[in-house]
Amino acid sequence: MAISYMTEDGYNKLQKEIELLETVERPRISQQIAEARDKGDLSENAEYDAAKEAQGMLEMKISQLKELYLNARILDESKINTDTVQILTKITLYNVKTKQEFDYTIVSDSEANLKEKKISVSTPIAKGLLGKKVGEVAEITVPAGTLLLEVRKIELAK
């Protein structure tokens, strides 16, 4: 798996999620399996099958999160330069066609959350903006067409 860059906050959230899955969810599913097993014939026991499937899904998720955690590198926010658009910068953009202004923060894949206006560094929009300076216009092709986005402001993400 590739190295995943994240903030210290994102790294800590990931650690807590793994802990929750291992200490709360894993025992809960094990209990469901035990209760279903106690009900008798396993060949026709839908509860047992469902609990075993849930256990498999949980173990897969734990494994994926642990791999992400082990390959994570914490970004040193003090070394981020706001001269150009880069990961962990908050940018104010102006859509030349729609004449609308909006903000995005560029973050790692694992921390992206559109509701919080955090976009992944690997999205077409972020890729098209990386390295741009204030005043520059990026022409970015997205599924809906071509965007012309002017960088209005670059600041350190909070």
Image (cartoon, rainbow, N blue to C red):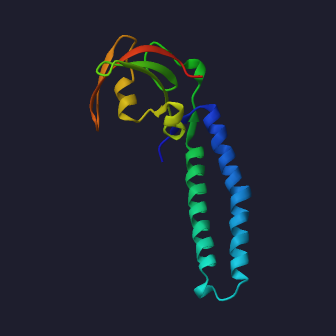
Q: Is residue 126 left or right of residue 75?
A: left
75 left or right, relative to 18: left
> What is the x, y in percent for residue 142?
30, 35
Count of number-bearing discs: 0
Q: Residue furthest top?
A: 135
Residue 149 vs 28, above or below: the answer is above
Residue at image coords 49%, 36%: 114
Task: Provide residue 76's location: percent of width, then percent of height.
Answer: 59, 25
The image quadrant of residue 139 is top left
Residue 24 in the image, given as x and y percentages of width and height = 73, 57
Residue name at image x 63 percent, y 71 percent:
51
Q: Hey, which residue is sitting farthest left in the picture?
A: 145
Is the residue 35 above or below the residue 132 in the image?
below
Q: Quadrant of the C terminus?
A: top right
Spot occupied by residue 89 in the image (x, y as percentages of width and height) = 50, 22
Image: 52 above or below 150: below
Horizontal side, residue 151 vs residue 57: left or right: left
| Relative depth, front residue between 48 and 98 | 98
**In the depicted view, which residue is nearer to us: 105 or 80?**
105
Residue at 58% in and 66% down: 56
Picture quarter containing residue 133?
A: top left
